Amino acid sequence: MDNKKSFAIGFAAGIVIVLVAVFGFNAFNRQGQWAGQQLDPNSKIMEIYGLLNDISIFPLDKDVMLENMYRGFLDGVGDPYTQYFDLEALEAFHVRTEGEYVGIGVSVLEDLDSMTVTVAQPFRGSPAAAAGILPGDRIIAVDGVDVVGRAISEVTGLIRGPEGTSVDITFFRPYESERFDVTIIRTVITIPTVFHEMMPNQIGYIRIEGFDQATRGQFTRAMDDLLSQNMTGLILDVRNNPGGILDIVAYIANYFVPEGVITYTVDARGRRQDFPADANYLGIPLVLLVNGRSASASELLGGAIQDTRVGILVGEQTFGKGIVQHVRYLSDGTAIKATVAQYFTPNGRSIHGVGVTPDLIVEMPESLSRMIGNMDIEEDVQLQAALRVFNRD
């Protein structure tokens, strides 16, 4: 791992020449010069390559070296959410946000403390669920390739593949301090992000496991069904939800937040963009369930509900990701994802690095948190607490 890191760092200095070729511009510091740069970037990268070509005992693959160099250059930003997408990783990213792909059936998030891609939730009925994969399991290796420290797009790209083929994945389960290997057969996954049911006393329940393109239609159908059954109150469950598309969560929040601002973003130049709610909100009693793996768009929803006082948040402190990423495409069909803005709650709160504190804190053992969506109601102490909020009212 240290050798790989050193290699990436060494090549990061030479990435500029590639960007010049791709973008057609020179990158300068504010004085128009390369800060501390003695060699022309073109000369430096060729010097490095020439030395390696003379002394390295390993064969050099220029294409692979360049791809790693792009990644190394973006690593230099110091933001784990700024990433380079090669063609395979870009396709995987689109698949993840559009709602259907061939894979094992999990939603994932990046655990910055352990530098691993971590399972947020296995999809119900998926090959991963059948294999016993649980929320919080960390992906350590894919087909023998160490993926610790790699971008989420790279890891998911390695996991996906042709339908009917197998993939060998090494997981680490922190609360058991156990590593284990699983072979899973890939299948077509239609991402189910919304599940709903009617609970006692006409209290509706909707669990949202991600905010993808498919979520909008799934959520609308769930709401229509519950309203047709004369729903009198609603529990929204975004526990273990790693986030997703800003426009989708704004669409959902518009059901509940009164006319005004759902959230707003501020970019690097200080420009503000508001995401407004209209006057046609439901106005029904509302509880939002959150936990430590409720991230990004889930936290945005929580902040909007909390600030406008249209509902009560129940559960545990959320993850703390309050920044927005956009994808920008390069001329060769690859892309970069960069953090372009920070978002704020209607009252101007930033949750990045902090999270959202529930109105009613209800802790749940980690072993149960990993089973959300796959346990009896009686075992789910946070859901039981949410139901008691309605009974109290």
Image (tube, grey):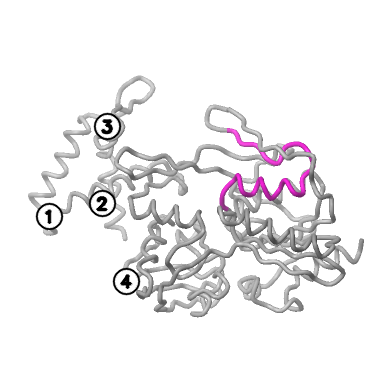
Q: Which residue is mark 3?
A: 20
- Kindly check if marks 4 and 3 are in contact, taking CB atoms under 8 A apart as contact: no
Magenta stretch contains residue 205: no
Q: Which residue is mark 4?
A: 144
Residue under the image location 41 percent in, 47 percent down: 83
**Element carrying mark 1:** loop
Q: CA distance from mark 1 to mark 3?
A: 27 Å
Give residue 122's quadrant in the image. bottom right
Residue under the image location 61 percent in, 36 percent down: 265
Q: Which of the marked residues, 4 or 3, is nearer the chain's N terminus?
A: 3
Q: Which mark is residue 56?
A: 1
Q: Nearer the viewer, mark 2 or mark 4?
A: 4
Image quarter hosting the C terminus: bottom right
Q: Which mark is residue 357?
A: none
Q: Is residue 67 left or right of residue 339?
A: left
Decide which of 298, 353 is in the foreground and name it.
298
Residue under the image location 55 percent in, 68 percent down: 136
**Element carrying mark 3:** helix
